[in-house]
Amino acid sequence: MWDEMMTSRTMKRHRDELFAGALRPVDQTTHDLMRSVCAHLTETDGRPVRLLLESFPPETVSGLWIDLGDHEVVAVEKNTLPLHQMVILGHELWHRKEASLGRRDANGTEGTDGTGGSDRAVAAAARVLGDRWNLGDAVSYVSARTDYDLEEERRAERFGRLLAAKFLPFLVGARSSTPPDAMVGRIRAALGR
């Protein structure tokens, strides 16, 4: 119970920090907002956090965070709704946050690598990436080599929804002026809006 309460507080604090740090001019696109969140993290943490919008291979994940040592990569599925993209970004950024908090990963070792697996898996993914970005290879390699931690994934998904809910007015417009289509309506309902 205590751990859950502390996690909730940490999530809300982190969400509010990301929201406050992101620039939100009225005409900013979802991709601009997501880049702004990553730019804020780069500024505050002193290490580049690069956002990539990519088409993920079918039947795999929709986001990926990898710490490559001198920089980090957050890849988000580009072929989905803007609101869903923000949920994915938040999900991956929560994996990043848990790594910075020193949570144990599914292998029982200290910290995580943003994929729910061992540091060896990330090093291997970095080798696969090399000088080029091949998302399909990285996703396949990391997915095949990492353990899945259901509780970590639930926390990451919860944070993704919290972050998207905070940015909601900037993602789909004001509630009163933007009639949601069927899919946006379902996502809003899932966010409790």
Image (cartoon, rainbow, N blue to C red):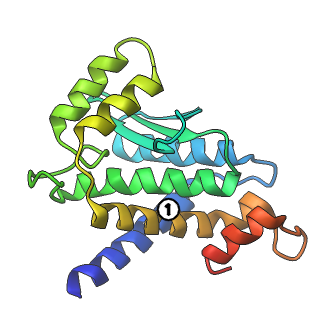
> How far across and how far down the image is residue 92, in percent?
42, 50
| Residue 71 visible in the displayed image | no
Location of residue 129 by image quarter: top left
Asked whether, in this view, residue 46 is left or right of residue 56, the answer is: left
Q: Can residue 148 be seen here?
A: yes
The C terminus: image quadrant: bottom right
| Image quadrant where one finds the N terminus | bottom left
- Residue 5's x, y, as percent? 30, 84
Of residues 174 and 77, the one drawn nearer to the viewer in this rendering: 77
Closest to the observer, 182 or 44: 182
Q: Which residue is mark 1?
A: 160
Q: Residue at x 46, y 26 (%)?
A: 136
The amino acid type of the residue labelled 1 equals: Gly
x then y, percent, for residue 157: 44, 63
Q: Is residue 163 above or below residue 138?
A: below
Quarter of the figure with residue 2: bottom left
- Which residue occupies 35% across, 35% down? 47
Using the image, determine if residue 124 lies above or below residue 164: above
Residue 16: x %, y % from top left: 50, 68
Query: Who's the residue at 45% across and 20% down the image?
Result: 134
Pointer 1 local density, CA inside 10 Å: few below 14, some 14–19, many at least 20: many
Seen in the picture, residue 152 relative to 78 is either above or below; the reply is: below
